[in-house]
Amino acid sequence: MRLTVLGSGTAAANPRRGAPGYLVEAMDETLLVDCGAGTLDRLLKAGGDAHKIDGVIFTHHHLDHFGEIAHLLFAARLPGHGRSRPLTLAGSAPLLKTFRGMQELFGPWLSPENFTLTLHDLDEEPMFGAGVCVSAYEVEHIPSSRALRLEAADGAVLAFSGDTDVCDGVLTAALAADLFVCEASFPEGGKQPGHLVPSEAGDLARQAGARHLLLSHFYPECDDTDMAAPAAEAFGKPVALATDGMVVAVAAAGGEPAW
């Protein structure tokens, strides 16, 4: 399973980091996890193609994680530039309700043309694809928020915290994960409700028994401080920091990720 970080930032403008977005490739399946502003441009720069995406999986519907889905669907129906490949959008029940409301607002511009669009409610059941099974777990942020667990056919497990505070849902999603991508939105001492600081992320990874921890979702003030050290102290292992364009080969237990 291969992970490409398309956006390691937040809704706050940052010349170093775009809004959240991650490309996951496993076997013949290509997924986006979250789709914030600029995700499609960064996908192209990373050598990807929006028309080859099989599914977009959302952690929640705050605009920095969700807003560019309108762009993706509008572009998918442009004459001469549209897509024919089926597309699945997956997330919690509250998120899908919000998406349907967006479709009502924009009318036909967000409706599929020449391709099939499927909405998958991860609260009802996991999503089984050609290369990855995706499960979702409720976390403490907003009602639509879910941590995600992606299990590849080769046994590799990739987990995403999404935006969250400390809670049991994150631990369940990250249990024994080969790579845990966890938010650390603010530096130590800057704790905000519904988000984590590095020591909390590290402690969650330790409790979950994750093999490797990648911190992401950094507000600009995080770039001026050491985010890795407090997380590593709590985790008991080295910790990596996400950067836009980073590529990680996620290996199953017994293997090491290629950073």
Image: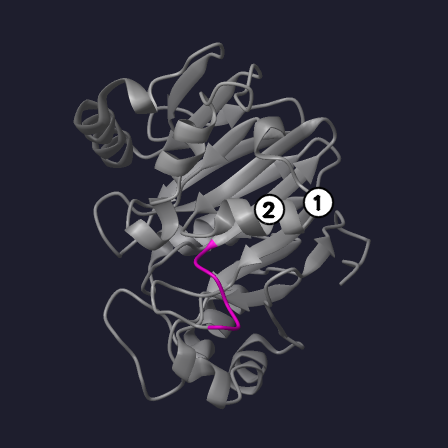
Q: CA distance from mark 2 to mark 1?
A: 7 Å
Image coords of residue 14 (percent x, y): 44, 72
Q: Is residue 89 left or right of residue 86?
A: left
Question: Front-most of 11 and 202?
Answer: 11
The residue at 30%/79% (across/down) is 191
Res. 47 mark:
1
Picture disc at residue 130: none
**Image point (29%, 45%), residue name:** 61
Q: Quadrant of residue 183?
A: bottom left
Residue 241 is covered by the magenta coloring: no
Judge by depth and name the residue closer to the eye, 55 or 1: 55
Q: On screen, 32 above or below 14?
A: above
User: Horizontally, is 86 left or right of 139 in the view?
Assistant: right
Crowd class of label 2 (few under 14; some 14 to 19; many from 20; radius 10 Å): many
Query: Which amino acid type is marked by label 2?
Result: Leu
User: Would residue 234 be found to the left or right of residue 154 on screen?
Assistant: left
Residue 43 placed where, x, y %? 60, 46
Which residues, given as a range, are shown in magenta? 15-20
The residue at which mark 2 appears reads as 43
Residue type, mark 1 in image: Gly
Residue 235 is situated, as x and y percent measured from the top left of the image, at 57, 75
Q: Secondary structure at mark 1?
A: loop
